[in-house]
Image (cartoon, rainbow, N blue to C red):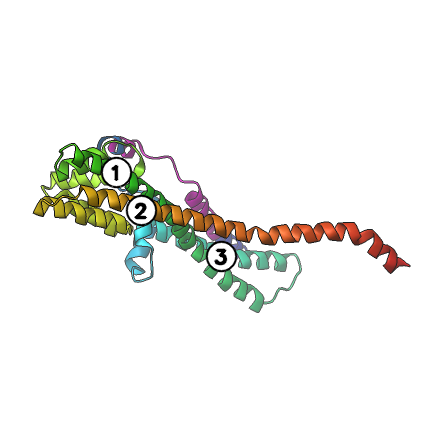
Amino acid sequence: MNVLFVVSGALVGFGLFLLVRELRPAPPRLEAVVARLRHGYVPPDTSGGVAERIGRVLAARLGSLPCPRRDLALLGRSVERFYATRAGCAVLGLTLPAVVSALLSATGGSPGIALPAGASLLGGLVLGLVPDLSVRAEAARRRADFRHAITGYLDLVALERSAGAGPADALEKAASVSDGWAFARIAAVLDQARRNQRPPWEGLARLGEQVGVAELTDLADIAALAGQEGARVLETLMSKAASMRGQALAAAKAEANGRTTTMVIPIALLGAAFLLLLTFPQIYRLVAS
């Protein structure tokens, strides 16, 4: 029984460590910060760390399981770290009911076997889905921010084109205007394409496919049309930016309307509680008499 307590406590502690590390990321490494300042965005280093090594083993053995790779690429997180976090949360959900059951048994209780086993399976399944839900929710917010940034980036590219810059120069100069994370991602892929002596729109298309932002792929198609056929794309860029602003405004209005609709329920419950508070003395008197 003592060995069971030690092993269960170690597994629960490891799961809590991974969960806390996921919710509170460690400070960035100095070389990663310097690389971001010099070259824009760079993927995180996953060469060290116990969690990364465990995640690398799990990714090699469980690579066929569904994994939000596009969302992780957008957030700049490694697949290995995601697998380690998922495993830690699942282990925490599996062992926590067992630890509670062992403590109850040690104090004289009799929880049985079926209830702790079912609770362990349910806890492992639920907590194992927590990293997926967290990554998808955060990626949805970052993707919406990315689309807002692309709208401004389209306007900047159109301004550069109207000033006489070529397609490649317009894309690079527009990306260097802001130091935000979205512009840094775009500037990084453009810089990599220039170093590899490849057209910049190929880097934009690859980034759009990697992070799941179709608007970036559309921009790459427009830039490729301008670079290969010499077409006049200034009006196309401006109309695309206007269309994206219209879509963002419609989405914001729909979200506001949805939140307004959901506010009806708590307001109705608050009104019902207030009426119950007002009528409670009379109802109590009637019941007591």
Disc number placed over residue 93 in the picture, else none: 3
What residue lies at 50% left-to-right and 59% top-to-bottom?
123
Dividing the image into 4 quarters, which one contains the C terminus? bottom right
Q: Which of marks 3 and 1 is nearer the N terminus?
A: 3
In this rendering, position of residue 189 left or right of residue 134: left
In percent of width and height, residue 273 lies at 70, 52
What residue lies at 10% left-to-right and 44% top-to-bottom?
227
In this rendering, position of residue 98 left or right of residue 179: right
Q: Name the residue under label 2.
A: 244
Q: Does the magenta stretch include residue 238?
A: no
Image quadrant assignment for residue 27: top left
- Do the residues bearing badges 2 and 1 touch, measured as CB atoms within 8 Å? no
Q: Earlier in the sequence, mark 3 or mark 2?
A: 3
Q: Mark 1 points at which residue?
A: 155
Q: Tell me: residue 56, above or below residue 164.
A: below
Is residue 201 visible in the rendered structure shown here?
yes
In percent of width and height, residue 96 lies at 53, 55
Name the amino acid type tagged 3.
Gly
Q: Which residues make up the magenta segment?
A: 10-35
Q: What element carries label 2?
A: helix
